[in-house]
Image: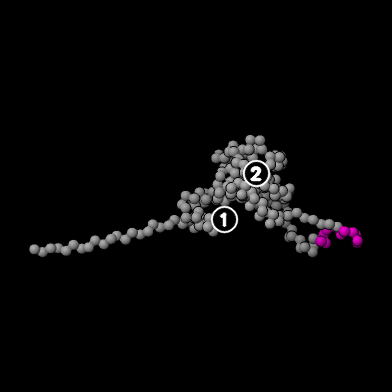
């Protein structure tokens, strides 16, 4: 009796599942967050997709919020520092003149950003997103130089641009958002409530800002 030997069955090699990684999302995220946060986002398929969609929308909003205008005359080259002194009025001999300037101090701005971000738990006050968000001044820094926490709000990058441009308005009485022009966010966020931080927004400052909107 001939017994046929059965060939041993080889175990199928189990290949480990490939880890998801979105290179484009990582390269964009690293610009606004630390390496660990960007790495985690780029390995989460759903978060990476939402981040890229938001970035695409924000990029389109930049063109809407900051329109380009044709110059009526050519722009003159900037003056050199020594020429600035020559162009200014020269006081008579012996008179003391105090010159002061107000600008964006990097340390003050860093303190403002961190304080506002902490006040809103690092999330947008309107959408609740924690990805690609920025600390935004209620009354503009260049006009008021106000870095108080009650003059700040945390917004996503796109909403920040619209708020600065006066396209998105926060009603000081109802604390809801309104859009002055049709845009990506209007159909989703028109009338949405604004979540207050631990230190609420100063409504008088918000009303003053709204008065400046045409």
Q: Where the C terminus falls, by quadrant?
A: top right
Q: Quadrant of residue 150?
A: top right
Q: Earlier in the sequence, mark 2 or mark 1?
A: 1
User: Which residue in the protein does label 2 denote?
Assistant: 199
- Residue 184 percent across, percent down from the top left: 56, 43
- Residue 15 percent across, percent down from the top left: 35, 59
User: Which residue in the protein does label 1 denote?
Assistant: 33
Question: Does residue 68 show up magenta in the picture?
Answer: no
Residue 113 appears left or right of 43: right
- Residue at 43 percent across and 57 percent down: it is 19
Between 8 and 83, the one lying in front of the other is 8
Between 101 and 84, the one lying in front of the other is 101
- Residue 206 percent across, percent down from the top left: 68, 41
- Residue at 67 percent across and 50 percent down: it is 69
Is the magenta region chiefly helix, strand or loop?
loop
Circle nearer the viewer, 2 or 1:
2
User: Which secondary structure, mark 2?
Assistant: loop
How far apart are labels 2 and 1 at the CA level?
A: 24 Å
Mark 2 surroundings within 10 Å by alpha-carbon count, few (fewer than 14), some (14 through 19), many (20 or more): few
On the question of residue 61 being in view, the answer is: no
Mark 1 surroundings within 10 Å by alpha-carbon count, few (fewer than 14), some (14 through 19), many (20 or more): some
Question: Does residue 95 show up magenta in the picture?
Answer: yes
User: Which secondary structure, mark 1?
Assistant: loop
Between 165 and 64, the one lying in front of the other is 165
Q: Quadrant of residue 163?
A: top right
Residue 121 appears left or right of 209: left
- Residue at 57 percent across and 55 percent down: it is 33
Residue lying furthest top = 174
Residue 169 appears left or right of 9: right
- Residue 135 percent across, percent down from the top left: 63, 49
On the question of residue 146 being in view, the answer is: yes
User: Magenta stretch?
Assistant: 85-96
């Amino acid at each position: 009796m001939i017994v046929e030997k059965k060939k041993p069955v080889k175990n199928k090699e189990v290949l480990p599942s490939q880890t998801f990684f979105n290179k484009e999302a990582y390269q964009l995220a690293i610009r606004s967050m630390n390496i660990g946060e960007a790495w985690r986002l780029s390995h989460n398929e759903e978060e990476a997709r939402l981040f890229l969609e938001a970035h695409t929308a924000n990029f389109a909003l930049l063109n809407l919020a900051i329109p380009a205008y044709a110059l009526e005359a050519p722009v003159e080259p900037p003056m050199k520092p020594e020429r600035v002194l020559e162009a200014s009025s020269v006081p008579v001999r012996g008179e003391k003149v105090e010159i002061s300037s107000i600008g964006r101090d990097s340390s003050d701005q860093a303190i403002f950003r961190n304080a506002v971000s902490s006040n809103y738990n690092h999330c947008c006050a309107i959408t609740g997103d924690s990805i690609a968000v920025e600390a935004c001044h209620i009354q503009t820094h260049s006009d008021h130089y106000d870095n108080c926490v009650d003059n700040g709000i945390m917004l996503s990058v796109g909403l920040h641009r619209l708020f600065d441009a006066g396209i998105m308005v926060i009603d000081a009485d109802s604390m809801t958002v309104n859009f002055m022009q049709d845009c990506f966010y209007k159909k989703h966020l028109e009338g949405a409530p604004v979540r207050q931080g631990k230190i609420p927004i100063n409504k008088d400052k918000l009303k003053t800002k709204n008065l400046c909107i045409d």
